[in-house]
């Protein structure tokens, strides 16, 4: 597990996943203003991370489709410390091998399914931003925003409209 610490008491976290090498201008626009960006895997290309780094510091985990030397540098999972809150990041929630509540995590961020979802279980927020990459079936193209502050973590899903000139739509 990779650990990252921040002394900031509150922050806006942009959460993105399953870009599969496609970085949509709408995603970049909606991530502006984030204090931190978390990519939950299936990045697809190092250029995606470079584009995100131009907006805010980025923490990313490796997804099942991330291959090559650049991808081997990404951890399988990560722990991000934000003030009093610990966030656990993993690509595929089915690979979660710990009890988040017992481990003291405020939130678990994941991707893989391409389905945006916000759920609370045992006082832990589970957030999947969906996919910001190429459209899959009829699933929405989306990212998420996580606001982490004293006493709470609140998430929202942000649906993106595909760019009209995008062939991947």
Image (cartoon, helix red, strand yellow):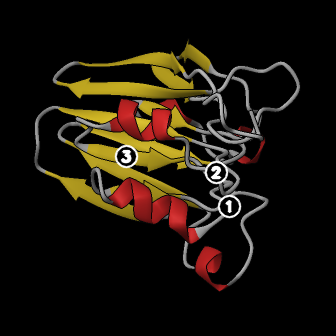
* Position above or below: 96 against 121: below
Locate residue 78, reporting x and y percent: 48, 57
Residue at label 3? 37
Instruction: Please tell me whether residue 72 is drawn above or below residue 112 in the rendered image.
Output: below
Marks 2 and 1 close (CB-CB < 8 Å): yes
| Spatial CA span between label 2 and label 3 | 16 Å
The residue located at (77%, 40%) in the rendering is 168
Mark 1 lies on a secondary structure that is loop
Q: Secondary structure at mark 3?
A: strand
Q: Is residue 23 left or right of residue 92?
A: left
Residue bearing mark 2:
22
Q: Within 10 angstroms of label 1, few (less than 14), some, or many (20 or more) residues?
A: many
Q: Classify residue 74 as left or right of residue 53.
A: right
SS for dot 2: loop
Lower position in the chain sequence, tag 3 or tag 1: 3
Image spot of residue 126 (x, y percent): 55, 25
| Residue 137 figure quarter | top right
Given this view, does label 2 or label 1 mark the residue nearer the observer? Answer: 2
Q: What residue is rendered at 57% in x and 14% in y? A: 119
Residue where numbered disc 1 is placed: 44
Q: Position of residue 109 (x, y in %)?
A: 53, 37
Between discs 2 and 3, the one toward the N terminus:
2
């Amino acid at each position: 597990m990779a650990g990252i610490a921040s002394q900031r008491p509150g922050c806006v976290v942009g959460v993105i996943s399953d870009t599969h090498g496609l970085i949509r201008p709408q995603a970049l626009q909606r991530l502006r203003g984030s204090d931190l960006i978390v990519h939950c895997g299936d990045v697809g290309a190092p250029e995606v991370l470079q584009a995100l780094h131009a907006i805010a510091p980025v923490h990313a985990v490796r997804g099942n489709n991330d291959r090559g030397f650049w991808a081997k540098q990404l951890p399988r999972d990560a722990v991000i410390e934000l003030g009093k809150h610990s966030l656990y990041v993993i690509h595929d929630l089915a690979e979660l091998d710990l009890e988040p509540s017992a481990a003291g995590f405020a939130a678990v961020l994941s991707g893989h399914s391409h389905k945006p979802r916000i759920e609370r279980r045992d006082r832990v927020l589970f957030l999947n931003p969906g996919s910001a990459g190429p459209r899959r079936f009829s699933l929405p193209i989306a990212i998420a925003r996580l606001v982490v502050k004293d006493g709470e973590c609140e998430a929202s899903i942000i649906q993106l409209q595909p760019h009209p000139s995008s062939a991947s739509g």
